[in-house]
Image (cartoon, rainbow, N blue to C red):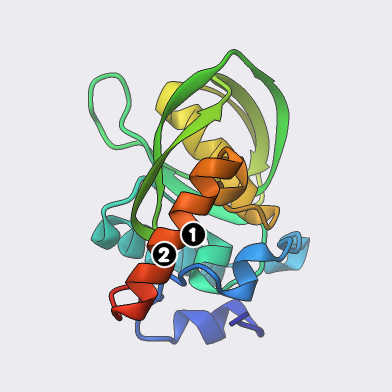
């Protein structure tokens, strides 16, 4: 379910619905946000994505997860003082990664599913904000995990792809059970 059209078509929707695996948009490489798409409506879509993310209890949400095949995501990983840190990354590019962290990871497109995933501990990412201004962020720990996870979504990669073969098969079996009982829709 890929949404087409202008940002205003999306803004006029009542609420953004988080799509679930195996929706095809989750496996599609998102298109770059073009210069003429940095409008007030893009800011409204990002704001709606934050609202959907908070409602679902997440810390990050990529455009493909709400059916928009574009390269951007929102995240709010609290800072060292526990204060909100709302960031929007448009056209993200991973510049460098280092270190390693292994930990439980979840995904709003895989509700209730948590698996151990290995990610880099630190990431430097280059992106644009919702006004089109370029910036670079140097992030560690959960923030790095979130940027890598959401950038994967922009690249058509889901977190199942980052699991070991055994864990991936176990996760797929769990999803099938949930689908059969109607608890996945």
Residue beneath disc 1? 172
Image check: 133 left or right of 31? Answer: left
Residue at figure coordinates x 59%, y 82% from the top left: 1
- Image quarter where the C terminus lies is bottom left
174 or 35, which is in the foreground?
Answer: 174
Image check: 161 left or right of 76? Answer: right
Work out whether 154 lies above or below 89: below
Work out whether 68 lies above or below 172: below
Image check: 112 left or right of 163? Answer: left
Image check: 40 left or right of 155? Answer: left
Residue at figure coordinates x 67%, y 57% from the top left: 71
Residue beneath disc 2? 175
| Image position, residue 145 (x, y; %) | 49, 32
Residue 145 can be seen in this image: yes
- Give the secondary structure at mark 1: helix
- For the residues labelled 2 and 1, say whether their Cβ atoms are less than 8 Å apart: yes
| Image position, residue 103 (x, y; %) | 41, 28
Q: Where, by quadrant of the figure, is residue 30 drawn?
A: bottom right
CA–CA distance in space, label 2 to label 1: 5 Å
42 or 126, which is in the foreground?
Answer: 126
Residue at figure coordinates x 33%, y 70% from the top left: 178
- Give the secondary structure at mark 2: helix
| Image position, residue 100 (x, y; %) | 56, 17
Number of dots carrying numbers: 2
Q: Residues within 10 Å of mark 2 (few under 14, many from 20)?
A: many
Work out whether 114 lies above or below 175: above
Residue 129 can be seen in this image: no
Residue at figure coordinates x 24%, y 31% from the top left: 83
| Image position, residue 93 (x, y; %) | 72, 39
């Amino acid at each position: 379910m890929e949404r087409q059209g202008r940002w205003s078509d999306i803004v006029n929707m009542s609420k953004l619905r988080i799509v679930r695996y195996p929706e095809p948009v989750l496996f599609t490489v998102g298109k770059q946000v073009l210069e003429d798409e940095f409008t007030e409506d893009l800011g409204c879509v990002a704001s709606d994505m934050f609202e959907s993310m908070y409602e679902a209890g997440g810390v990050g949400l990529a455009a493909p997860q709400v059916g928009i095949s574009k390269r951007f995501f929102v995240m709010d990983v609290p800072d060292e003082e526990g204060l909100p840190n709302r960031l929007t990354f448009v056209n993200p590019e991973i510049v460098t990664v280092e270190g390693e962290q292994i930990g439980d990871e979840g995904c709003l497109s895989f509700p209730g599913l948590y698996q151990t995933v290995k990610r880099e501990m630190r990431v430097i990412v280059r992106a644009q904000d919702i006004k089109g201004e370029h910036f670079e962020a140097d992030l560690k720990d959960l923030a790095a995990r979130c940027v890598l996870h959401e950038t994967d979504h922009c690249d058509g990669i889901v977190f199942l792809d980052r699991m070991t073969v055994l864990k991936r098969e176990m996760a797929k079996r769990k999803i099938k059970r949930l689908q059969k009982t109607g608890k996945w829709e």
